Image: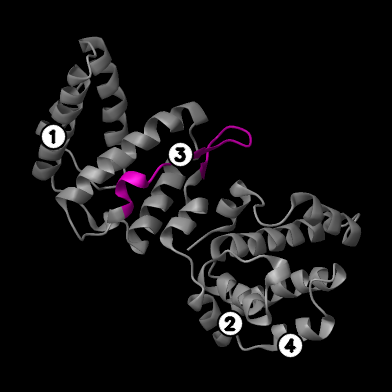
Amino acid sequence: MLILGEIQLRGFFSIQTELAEKTLNFRHPYDIDSKRSMRHAWRMFDAYMTLTGFHPHAMCLDDHAGFRGFLCKALQLTEDNAKSFTWQLLQDFVLVCFLEEKEANLFLSMPQAECNEIYQEREPTKCRFLHYQSLFPTSDSNGFMYVDFGSIMHLLSNAFFHCLGRLLTEYLAPLPTVQAEIDAPLIIAIAQGLLYDHPGVDFCKIHLNATDSADFIGNVRAHAEWRMHNAGFFRGDVAMNWKYLSAVLMNFFVANNICCLNKAGRRMLAPY
C-alpha cells in the first residue's frame, strides 16, 4: 500500500517535471485547486510508471488500464475516485497526444475489476515499493529523511511493513530532521533484533510482557556496549549512545506497547 504523501515526497521520476507543470499551467492557469488535483493525478501516474517500469510513449491500452487498478489496489482509492483521477489525466493525455479520445473513452469504460487484474499482473516487487515507502516527513519545513530498511528486508511482510511505516510516520513527523536521522536507524536496529527473536510474527503483533521486555532491553544494552567498546569508543561515548538508544526504547517501543516496563526494565533503561 502507498499513500499520496509518500509519492509527493519522491516527486516526479518517469515524467519530466517541466512537461507536467507546462500542461497544468496551460489547462488551469488560474484555478489553483484544479491544478493541485491534477498535479496529484500526474504524480500518481508517475509512481505507477516508476513502479512498473512503463513509459507513456510505449504504453498500450491495458497498461493504462493498469493505472486504474493501481489506484484501487495500491492507493486503496474507491472506484469512483479512481475514475475521477483517471478522467482528469486522460484529458491531459489527449491534449498532449499520448492518446486519442476514442482510446481514452474505451479505457475509462473498462470494468474496474478488469483494471485491478491487469495491475496485479504487473504488480512491482517489494523493493520497488520501498522506493517510495522509505521516505518520511519531519517537522522541518519541507523536511524529510530516508530510512534504510535493507537490514530487515528479508523479514518484511506487507502487513509488517505497513505497520512499521505507520508507527515511524507518527514518530518521526514531530522531530527535526537531525534528530530523526539519529533515531530512525536505532529503531530499525532494535526492530531487527525483535524480529529475529520472533520469526514469522508480524511486527505489530509483538507485545512483550514485563519480564521479557526487561530481558530484551538488557540484551540491547549489552550488545550496544559490546559493539562500542569493540570499536574503540570510550565510556563517555558508550553513555551517549545508550542515551539515544534508551530514549528510542522508551518513546517508540514502550510508547507503542511493544515493550512494557517493570522495575527491572526501568533499571535497564537507566543512564550510565
Question: Which is more N-terminal, label 4 or label 1?
Answer: 4
Q: Is residue 8 magenta?
A: no
Question: Which is more N-terminal, label 3 or label 2?
Answer: 2
* Location of mark 4 (residue): 106
Task: Using a 10 Å C-alpha cutoff, classify the residue at mark 4 as few (fewer than 14 neighbours), some (14 to 19) or many (20 or more).
Answer: few
Q: On the picture, is 177 further left or further right than 159?
A: right
Instruction: Give the magenta-colored segment's residue range.
Output: 136-153
Question: Which is more N-terminal, label 1 or label 2?
Answer: 2
* Location of mark 2 (residue): 115
Task: Using a 10 Å C-alpha cutoff, classify the residue at mark 3 as few (fewer than 14 neighbours), some (14 to 19) or many (20 or more).
Answer: many
- Residue type, mark 2 in image: Cys
Marker disc for residue 219: 1
Q: Disc 3 on helix, strand or loop?
A: helix
Residue 114 is situated, as x and y percent measured from the top left of the image, at 56, 87
Marker disc for residue 172: 3
Quarter occupied by residue 180: top left
Q: On the picture, is 237 further left or further right than 26?
A: left
Q: Report if the CB atoms under discs 2 and 1 are less than 8 Å apart.
A: no
Q: Report if the CB atoms under discs 1 and 4 are less than 8 Å apart.
A: no
Q: Is residue 152 magenta?
A: yes
Q: Nearer the viewer, mark 2 or mark 3?
A: 2
Residue 102 is situated, as x and y percent measured from the top left of the image, at 81, 86
Residue 22 is situated, as x and y percent measured from the top left of the image, at 85, 54
